[in-house]
Amino acid sequence: MSDERKGPELLRRNVGRLRSRVGGCVVGSHAIFRDKDLHAELADASWLELYLFGITGRRFSKPELQLLDTMWAYTSYPDARIWNNRIAALAGSARSTGNLAISAALAVSEGAIFGRGIDMRASEFLIRTCAEVEAGAELGPLVRRELSERRSLAGYGRPISNRRDERLDPTLKVARSLGLADGPHVRLAHDIERFLLDSRLRMAMNYGALGAALTADLGLSPREHYMYGFGAFLAGMPPCYLDASDRPAGTLFPLPCDAVAYEGPPKRSWHKS
Amino acid sequence: MEETTYMQSRIWLEEPEPNNPFAARAAFCHGYEVYGEMLGSAGWVDMVYLLFKGEAPSRAQAAALEVLAVALANPGPRDASIHAAMCAGVGGSPAAAALTAALAVGAGGAGGAREVLLAMQAWDACGRAVEAWSDHWRERARDGGEPLGIWPAAEHPAGFEPLGVSTPTPVKQVLARLARLDADSRCAWLQTNLASMEQASGHPLSLVGVAAAAFTDLGMCPEEGEMLFLLLRLPGAAAHALEQRESGHKRFPFYALELEAPAGGATT
């Protein structure tokens, strides 16, 4: 970033080598993960702890890790109707590989109206709004501004249901038991929901807002929250793939020809076009 | 809530075989019978254009798409998306993994499909006025000029090469070929105003910029251009992945490692 060289000279400087600030492997000897020896200094780290260390460069306490682990677990549903899970399951039904199935399902998990796309926006909105409210701004106009500029409020409302998000109470219960449910961003997330409901905007908080608020209170930036969220749906995907793989090939969501309602132009001749 | 068990499509109609509702007897793409009539008469780019735009292309449109399809088919092993596909090939990963790798890497805002989308949005916003382009780039360069989302913020004017010195010959050749097809096209305007546009952007034109102008000329919206750019670059990714699979890991660079001072976490 600080390299002043430009153009071909900047490229030439990087030919034939990997410059890394995050680590590497000395094959046959040891591996460096950020500035730590993976098999010595990080030997006791759980996978999630290592994953977060890789993203943030920071270590987290046991209660914090437990909350972050819970947040992944509580939003992993083995329901193949859900769009991203459906891809894993369709891959199973079509007899594709497990890795391709899960990779594609994860790739799809950063949608504009669900998953990582919402995570990033929700985290940025809550962190920015929290700072503005702490500086003395009134919440209502900030929420209305966001709604007007973005036409939606990331983390509020839900595309397939207007019922209360079933993940909220169990997650808050765990967060409370760990003493992690009362940070400023979580309080703000509740305040925003109250404002929305009082204003008859009918947008209840969903898991996107709560998750973003909880990690913001742990000090995660929007981008760190986005990267952390990678595993949020993951545990539900392999069962979808496996279940479909164990059934007769091609029998998941079969569609007869007349189940695709055609709404296009009438039949016409190519030769006249 | 009523159960929705059907899909809707303006693109595709299938009629079933009399003995099996799950097998198509005939398929129609935007009204044209594909296997009974188009086959043998329509070219591949005709079909691609029809799928995206819902109408058969004119002769000039088909010719432009044909030029683009050839020009974009293989960015070559120096391109990051092809490099990614070769990584899949060298390790013997599945074919779909090679194409997935090329798509993921080739999707970005630096030389990838995201940059095509941004450049096409700029065409929509700025049209054929160099001053408007200058204002647009100034606006985008300001902090916070781009909404925060999953995509990293753009670091250079879309469609131009931030590390280039001058517009490479093949880029000029593709632009010239496209400009020749229609004197009133954006490609023709871009060719005429290339020096001014390069001066305004501070960078030479890239193939991404030519593709964005050409897709816009074809009536594609930015999202359609983004998709087509991803699609049209896959042949090279596939061929290089297969080539690398065959030539093996001993003939594929692994690179020296230089560790630098540790970085902080992901910011923003």
Image: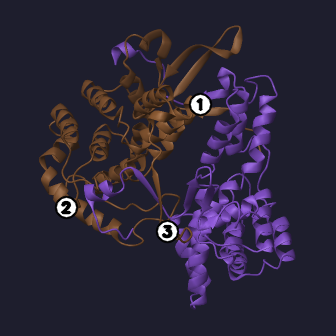
Chain colours: A purple, B brown
Label 3, label 2: how far apart the Cα atoms are: 30 Å
Instruction: Determine the chain carrying the residue at label 1.
Output: B
Confirm whether circles 1 and 2 share one chain: yes
| Image coords of residue B41 (percent x, y) | 37, 12
Say if residue B179 shows up in the picture.
Answer: yes
- Residue located 53% across and 58% down the image: B150
Question: Which residue lies at the image location 34% right of the left edge and 15% below the top edge?
Answer: A272
> Considering depth in this image, is A163 or B183 the residue closer to the camera?
B183
Compared across the picture, whether A79 is left or right of B245 comes to right
Q: Chain of mark 3?
A: A
Question: Residue A144: horizontal and vertical position, in percent?
Answer: 56, 75
Q: Is residue A155 visible?
A: no
Q: Nearer the viewer, mark 1 or mark 2?
A: 1
Q: Examine the rendered structure and indicate whether residue A169 appears above or below residue A242.
A: below
Q: Residues within 10 Å of mark 1 (few under 14, many from 20)?
A: some
CB atoms of marks 3 and 2 within 8 Å:
no
Mark 2, other Cα within 10 Å: few <14 / some 14–19 / many ≥20: some
Q: Is residue A201 above or below residue A273?
A: below
Please state which amino acid type lies under the numbered disc 3.
Answer: Glu
Please give the residue where the numbered disc 2 appears in the rendered image.
B200
Q: Is residue A107 left or right of residue A64?
A: left
Say if labels 3 and 2 share a chain.
no
Find residue B68 and name its label: none
- Furthest residue in direction front, as rendered: A29
